[in-house]
Amino acid sequence: MIDDGAQGGDAGALGLEGLLEWTHARYVARTTATPLRTTAARLDEAHGAILAKALTSPYDEPFADAAAHDGYAVCGEGPWQVVDLAHDVALSQHFAMRVRTLQVLPGHTDAVLARGRGVVDVRDDGTEVLTARDPLTDLPERYARPELGTGIVRQGQIRSAGTELIPAHSIVTPGVLALAAAAGLDTVDVIAPPAVGTLVLGSTLLTNGPPRDGRVRDALGWTIPALLGSLGARANPPLRAPDTHDLLLAEIDDASVDMLVVTGSTSPGGDNILRTALRDIGAHWLIDGISMTPGAQTLLVRLPDGRLLLGLPGDPVAALAGLITLAAPLIAGLRGAALSAPNESAAGDDSTRLVPSRAILTAATPAPDYDDDTTLVPVRLSATDLPAHSAGDTFATALPADGPARLNGWASADAVAVIPPGAGQAGDTVPVLDLLGRPAST
């Protein structure tokens, strides 16, 4: 529910009143999360961030007159004595200097004679003398010389200072870092990546070993930061807290993050400490439940200080569905990035492999909890051609909800199929997200 006026009233804070349709919830998350502050990031910390403004050349290129090709910088008429000069020493009449492509030229250079257009003779005293070839006979001719200014790239001829190299809002890739370093930059202006914390509620959860003594392993503490980090957030290690109202309030207040993800205690009811705590601090409700199976009890609020809090159900499958639904649009909004998956994964991580925008179901998917629910289903993708379908169609096969905490299908999936209300039969074409909750690039 979008509650523009309530500051944590009972209906908004404690009940799933007016659940949002799945695409509406994604829209709310994307438009609620706005880009963070701009900061100057060192090159060693800028990778993966979004450029806040265009990367521009800090100087003219070349920054002084330079050689257009390998050869000889010459001054005056030939023949020329070949010498080696310091970079700040000018040529004198009848002297030449070997130069490489785009090497800055010594002062008084009249032209650059291409390497193949001259002949160097070595005299008995070791002096090297350069003679240009006649352009008609191709023979060495003492009166031959290149035309004035030929073979020279003038200062700023390639690009002048301030020329755009990489446009604003581009991702800082390794190639961008290399370009920035080559241009002589030490920092780049980026949109600060969001810092995100994870708070796992539940005094009965175990942090190591198998389930025992009526307690189960925490399946989300390390999962959530990993997924958020893959989306470009700076994800802090998880914190764990018992289901205690005062401790929860203290943790929320103490979290120095742009967004806090809390797992557990999102179900409706007056004894729910997360909802009660959010009501007590006057949180502004943005999403109070989503018409989806699983993960209906996912919530999103803005805290009084402006930070976002994403509440996920304690059940691991429901939490994954809520995370895949809202994390990608939230992190994209905070980063100022596109929601869609990039064309390729810079890290080569299988979790960010490209998936198609839509796929054809090979069999019926599990029924939703309610007829108007959108269902998220982990699927295996294949490109097997079947009769009555075009070559290259992608097919999706739903994976079973089995294994520890019913997570086997999610662990084995290639992608997540988004089954709209009324769909889910074999042959239906449905939207597909990657395993981070992003649609394919368009």
Image (tube, rainbow, N blue to C red):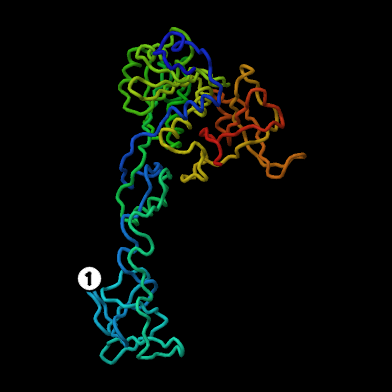
Q: Say whether residue 202 is left or right of residue 186.
A: right
Which quadrant would residue 275 be assigned to in this image?
top left
Left or right: 171 with respect to 95? right
Vertical side of 355 occupied by 102: above or below: below
- Of all residues shown, which one is farthest toward the right? 387
- Helix, strand or loop at label 1? It is loop
Q: What is the x, y in percent for residue 74?
A: 31, 80
222 or 292: nearer the viewer: 292
On screen, 428 above or below 272?
below
Which residue is situated farthest in the left direction here?
Answer: 89
Residue 257 rendering spot, x and y as whole percentages: 34, 28
Q: How many numbered marks are there?
A: 1
Residue at (72% x, 32% y) in the render: 427
**In front here: 345 or 389?**
389
Q: Residue at x 44, y 86 (%)?
A: 135
Q: Position of residue 109 (x, y in %)?
A: 29, 76
- Hey, which residue is sitting farthest bottom in the picture? 124
Residue situated in front as seen by the camera: 289 or 320: 289
In the image, 323 versus 413, the foreground residue is 323
Quarter in which the C terminus is drawn: top right
- Residue at the image position 53 percent from the left and 20 percent from the top: 20
Q: Is residue 163 above or below residue 345?
A: below
Mark 1 neighbour class, 10 Å CA radius: few under 14, some 14 to 19, many 20 or more? few
* Residue where numbered disc 1 is placed: 88
Give, as a three-letter code, the residue at label 1: Asp
Residue 404, position as x, y percentages in the image: 54, 24
